[in-house]
Amino acid sequence: MELQAVLMAAGGGSRMTDLTYNTPKAMLPVGNKPLMWYPLNLLEKVGFEEVIVITTKEVQKAMSTDLKIKDVKMKLDVVSIQEDGDMGTADALRHIQPKIKTDILVLSCDLITDVALHEVVDLFRAHNATMAMLMSKAHEFTETVPGQKGKKKTAEQRDFVGVDKSGKRLLFMANEADLEDGLSIRKSIMRKHPRMLIKTGLVDAHLYCLKKAVVDFLTENKSISSIRGELVPYLVRKQFSKTASASNPLLFLHLFLFWCPELLISSRDEPLLQLAQERSCWNDHRGDMSEAYHGGKLRCYVHIMDQGLCCRVNTLAAYIEVNRLAPKLFEEPSVHPSADISERCQMGSDSIIGAVCHIADKTSIKRSTIGNFTTVKEKVKVTNSIIMHGVTIEEGCNIQGSVICSNAVIGRGADLKYCLVGNGQHIEPEGVNVCVWYLFISAKCLSQLGKFLHSQV
């Protein structure tokens, strides 16, 4: 491939710690596949043969034993980084800069999408862009989140995204938190693009095509730590800055040398290149007589998905929703061949049963995912729930709208509704949902307290 693929898989899942406390975010099961399998599968389907995976030693160890990851045919060049929490995504790109030989395609391990990847790459190549990114309409989660029934959702701050008339050229980007004095647009943008559309309700998918020179730039500018929070707004803003600013001539020289190397290489053919740009069907000057792209050397583009699945699994609500939607992305039997399921079990067609599961008589499983090596005993009802790997559910339990993490044991007759049971927790027989959150949180707090006390010794 003409692009190198980079998968970011070192995130700790700070917005879903109830799930990631014992399981790395990249390895959370979604439809009985590790979360990071989905972007890897996306890359493999379009022909990538190698991908650089930036992750932690914990995830690297888990990858080496996971059967689904081992089935990936691409070469996985795994680069481990420190788990200190201080390294951002731009820092991670800076860390692997010696490995980058071409332009790159960067995507996050928590992205699940059926996007036609060429839509983003075509924009990047056709316009010789500095950056092209993927965005989608914000997803409305329909499932009730365990522990949050009746609670008001915290309103997330909106992004304001400005695009040209075509809806492809990215002209402006700002977060609501940064607009203390209201929304203001630079005159330099309005002069070149007098008809700009401001969109809200969009979500950054964390999928970017970037020029190799951008990575080279990051090695020089170590103040930028995050791709989404700092690098992307910086690139969008710099499209319309005064490149010949006398106040920062070194920056202008850097942009010219590193972001536009093709201009130096082919300067003898400049008149022909200029003529080709002016007559190109890919320009954005919309019939006026100005130079194609209005003379801009930095160009940012965005592909906005308005149909299909595009979701980042970075919250508990998103995790629950994609477990319902993700199985539609691939054609596989809903029941693993090694699963042992009683003929007297009622199972809906919208449920998934994992490998080496044992499902006993008189059980009912509807709209649920049952993980590998899980045992469900007699007269159990599981509805609209996620049961992870290695769980044991004793006789007569009723589980509705819940998430049961790996290796948990649900005692006989327990009635759980909209609950989350932590990894390895044991729910006593006849237990009710009030106890579940107490057990999960108590174990978590005790462990954190132990770590704190140990650090003070």
Image: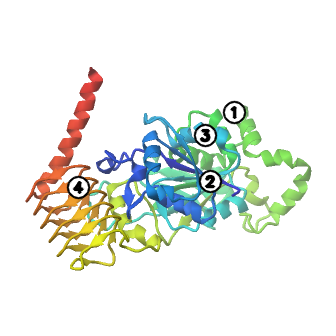
Question: Which picture quadrant has residue 123?
Answer: bottom right
Three-letter amino acid code of the residue under disc 1: Asn
Element marked by disc 4 = strand
Query: Toward the viewer: 242 or 2?
Result: 2
Badge nearest the viewer, 3 or 1: 3
How crowded is the residue under tag 2: few (<14 C-alpha within 10 Å), some, or many (20+)?
some
Q: Position of residue 180 (x, y in %)?
A: 44, 45
Three-letter amino acid code of the residue under disc 2: Glu
Badge nearest the viewer, 3 or 2: 2
Query: Toward the viewer: 162 or 154?
Result: 154
Q: Is tag 4's residue or tag 3's residue first in the polypeptide sequence?
A: 3
Question: Which picture quadrant has residue 431?
Answer: bottom left
How crowded is the residue under tag 3: few (<14 C-alpha within 10 Å), some, or many (20+)?
some
Q: Is tag 3's residue or tag 1's residue first in the polypeptide sequence?
A: 3
Residue name at image x 30 percent, y 54 percent: 154
Residue 319 in sight: yes
Three-letter amino acid code of the residue under disc 4: Leu
Q: Position of residue 63 (x, y in %)?
A: 46, 49
What residue does disc 4 label? 420
**Disc 1/disc 4 C-alpha distance (Å):** 54 Å
Q: Position of residue 223 (x, y in %)?
A: 56, 33
Three-letter amino acid code of the residue under disc 3: Ile
Answer with left or right where residue 47 lies relative to residue 7. Answer: right
Q: Is tag 4's residue or tag 2's residue first in the polypeptide sequence?
A: 2
What residue does disc 1 label? 248
Q: Is residue 404 above or below residue 89?
A: below
Q: Which mark is residue 96?
A: 3
Q: Is tag 2's residue or tag 1's residue first in the polypeptide sequence?
A: 2
